[in-house]
Image (cartoon, rainbow, N blue to C red):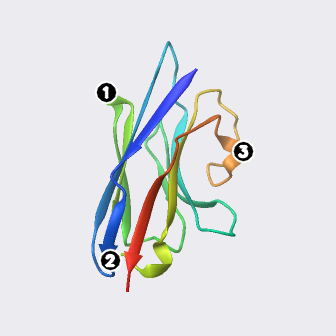
Amino acid sequence: QVQLVESGGGLVQAGGSLRLSCAASGRAFSIFAMGWFRQAPGTERDFIAAVTWGDGVTTYADSVKGRFTLSRDNAKNTIYLEMNSLKPEDTAVYYCAVDVRATMRAVVFPSAYNYWGQGTQVTVSS
């Protein structure tokens, strides 16, 4: 069993910044990928960014490229999402996810991940 704890959400004005963090913990697990998704009311869970753990390659959704940056701390099994130039349409619940079973699915799909965090609300006011 792996637990994910997210933090860093909140309310910010358009153009502002927020930093989310997500820490994975548990017994004897190996990380293959970690990612961020978001879900606004009435919509599907959308891919934001992910990192494959072995090579450190990051992938971003087009909607956040150039504004959001994913980074990681391998020793802490933690990923961060630095969000800049936030827009009202970025408002959503943000979830982190981890693949510890090597699903071999593309990181942009929720099915690539086995465990999810509880979500953290990000609200961007206009």
Q: Earlier in the sequence, mark 3 or mark 2?
A: 2
Q: The residue under label 2 is which amino acid type?
A: Ser
Can see residue 93? yes
Residue appearing at x 27%, y 75% in the figure = 16
- In percent of width and height, residue 109 lies at 68, 52
Mark 1 or mark 3, which has the lower sequence index?
Answer: 1
What SS does tag 3 mark? Answer: helix
Looking at the rendered structure, which numbered label has been put on residue 75?
1
Query: Quick one: 41 or 48, which is closer to the camera?
Result: 41
The residue where tag 3 is placed is: 111
Is 15 positioned to the left or the right of 39 in the image? left
Is residue 84 visible to us here? no
The spot of residue 2 in percent (x, y) is 54, 25
**Residue 65 at x, y percent in the picture:** 44, 71
Horizontal side of 119 relative to 45 (left or right) equals: left
Q: CA distance from mark 1 to mark 3?
A: 26 Å
In this rendering, the answer to whether 53 lies above or below 35 is above
Q: Label 2: few (<14), some or many (≥20) within 10 Å?
A: some
Q: CA distance from mark 2 to mark 1?
A: 29 Å
Q: Please, is residue 31 above or below residue 63 in the view?
A: above
User: At x 32% / y 77%, what residue is drawn?
Assistant: 85
Which residue is labeled 2 in the image? 85
Task: Tell me which label, 2 or 1, sits earlier in the chain.
Answer: 1
Q: Residue furthest bottom?
A: 126
